[in-house]
Amino acid sequence: MSQMLEVEGLLRGMILGLELGPGERLTERWIEARFSASRTPIRAALLRLEAEGLVRREGRGWTVSPIDLGEIGQLGVYREAVELAALRLTCTLEDRSGVETLAAMLDSCEAATPREEWHRVGMDFHIELARLSGNEFLTRGVQDAMRRLSRARWLEVRDTAALARAWDEHRAILDAVREGDADRAAALMSAHLNGSRSRLIDSLREDRRGLRARGFAVIAA
């Protein structure tokens, strides 16, 4: 693995896992010392993370992008359009056996499973469900949206009841896909995404003061 990809992956993990909080300043010197990397790959890594919306330039330095409630709402609309298109394609396929792999992913999460794993599986469920469509552009669209929503969703997985509800909704969607019922699958997915988006934005609005007290930058919609 190149040094640029290594630095990019490590920084992305720290940002998505909130080890580097929204609004936190980054300097190339700090990154250089932390990862024993040289400036050229560091700059290349930061440019790639900037393209993902995870960091932004501020003067001569960089900051971790704030959590933007307006952006989350817009991403939700985009994500719904892309996921529903992929879902309808999947329902038309003769071979939908990949659904069973997704069902096993959901079943792998139990009460004792770390929240980090719930978070990962929840993201992978939507990406891999889109991948079943066979359309790589739709899959990339879902993957990009989920990545940009990752930090906000990380805050959401603290709610056990919300996780249980999401898993029930995931299973209902898979049942509809198994049967090839595109209309029912789309209706269930739409309700799931809209409900999840509303709960997430409401939760972040309620938690905004606490998040700011922790030094996290949150922009209101």
Image (cartoon, rainbow, N blue to C red):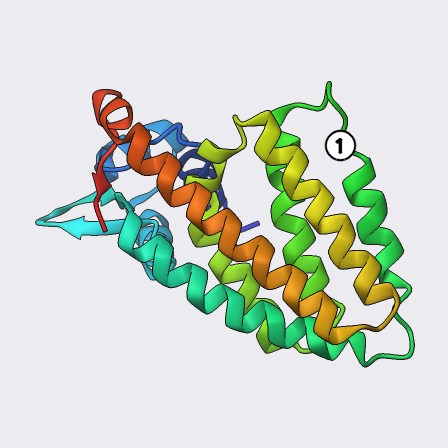
Quarter of the rendering containing residue 162: top right
Rendered residue at 71%/74% (across/down): 183
- Can you give x and y, in whole percent of width and height, for residue 86 in the image? 66, 73
User: Would you place residue 8 above or below residue 96 in this image?
Assistant: above
- Can you give x and y, in whole percent of width and height, for residue 27 in the image? 21, 37
Left of 72 or right of it: where is 24? left
User: Would you place residue 71 above or below residue 180 in this image?
Assistant: above
Q: Which kind of residue does numbered mark 1 sit on?
A: Cys
Quarter of the rendering containing residue 220: top left
Rendered residue at 69%/48% (across/down): 169
Q: How many marks?
A: 1
- Can you give x and y, in whole percent of width and height, for residue 117 in the image? 66, 32
- Judging by the rendered image, the residue that carries numbered circle 1 is 109
Quarter of the rendering containing residue 179: bottom right
- Residues packed near mark 1 inside 10 Å, few (<14), some (14 to 19) or many (20 plus): some
Residue 12, visible in the rendered structure = no
User: Would you place residue 11 above or below residue 129 in this image?
Assistant: above
Q: Secondary structure at mark 1?
A: loop
- Can you give x and y, in whole percent of width and height, for residue 12 in the image? 44, 43
User: Would you place residue 158 above or below residue 44 in this image?
Assistant: above
Of residues 180 and 134, the one drawn nearer to the viewer in this rendering: 180
Left of 199 or right of it: where is 111? right
Rendered residue at 64%/56% (across/down): 126
Rendered residue at 66%/69% (across/down): 186
Residue 16, visible in the rendered structure = yes
Left of 151 or right of it: where is 143? right
